[in-house]
Amino acid sequence: MLEANKSKSFQRLFYHYQKIHLIKRHFSVVSVKGDIDGKPDAPTIYFSNHSSWWDGLLIFQMTEAFSRQEHYIMMDEKGMNDYRFFRKIGAFSVNKKSPKDILRSLNYAEKLLSEKNAVWLFPQGKIEHPLQTPFTFESGLGHLIQKCDNVQLKPVTLHYYFTEKQKPVAAICVGDAIRVDGKTKTKKEWTLFCENLLNMQRIEQINDLTSDPDLPFQFPYKKIGKEGKSTSDRFDQIFKRGRT
């Protein structure tokens, strides 16, 4: 597996690149509702639906803008090899074709949590159609929770859609933190527990956005990114190469 190789200087560079360039180019708005961080005295597992290549990039942007924690995200190894800069912003790989590699990745995630970091998982295991519901999860999330005797769980739902504007809207909803003792349930029970949490949050989010598609443009949503001048060609070259 490929471990994360965070670079503070690259994180700052990439954050500003997205803030004044990428987000403006590709979205009419990207905004988030809910408190990003849980309590500081326990590690946090974030679990989210996976419906777009953009998910990891927008999660990075959101946590850089609104979180005080150190965040890491599990990412498919092929994607990591295609875009190696993800390691510099906190991604680590998993090769789902290898059971041994899956276990190494989960052990690495457990180590990060033991150091009071935040870890993100996409428990669907692959990108699925944004309207594919209900969500069904692979067992890695349940396995990781069961290894922790004091951890916070945070469900996160991302939704992309079009309004009358030319570019799509990206709306992110962060649920409340739930503190648990992972030893109290089986791996399967934790998997089903998290499935239910995310599915209920997803239904609520879709209902809200269907009733008022302009919600992400107003309070309580907080916008990520802003209008600004385009960055230099150097940023585009870094992004397109997928490595520095």
Image (spheres, grey):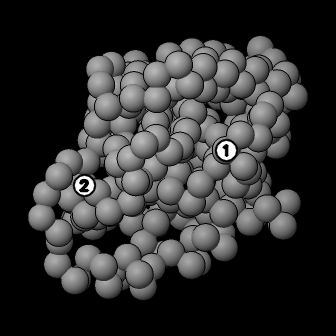
Which quarter shows the C terminus? bottom left
Q: Name the foreground residue: 212 vs 16.
A: 212
Q: Kindly give the residue lying farthest to the left in the view shown.
A: 229
The x and y percentages for residue 136 are: 82, 36
The residue pinned by badge 2 equals 19
Q: Is residue 145 above or below residue 29?
A: above
Q: Is residue 20 above or below residue 60?
A: below
In the picture, the quarter occupied by the N terminus is bottom right
Q: Residues within 10 Å of mark 2 (few under 14, many from 20)?
A: many
SS category of the residue bearing label 1: loop
Q: Is residue 224 left or right of residue 177?
A: left
Give 131 or 225, whichever is nearer the viewer. Answer: 131
Q: Circle 1 sits on which residue?
A: 130
Q: Which mark is residue 241?
A: none
Task: Please state which amino acid type lies under the numbered disc 2.
Answer: Lys
For the point 50% across and 75% down, the residue is: 83
> Residue shown at 46%/36% (left/top)?
171
User: Which of the two residues, 157 or 120, is positioned nearer the viewer here?
Assistant: 157
Query: In x, y percent, where is residue 99?
Result: 85, 60
The quadrant in which residue 143 appears is top right
Q: Is residue 68 left or right of residue 35?
A: left
As measured in the structure, the alpha-carbon distance from the residue carrying label 1 to the one carrying label 2 is 24 Å
**If you read the primary sequence from the N terminus, does the residue marked by circle 1 or circle 2 appear first?**
2
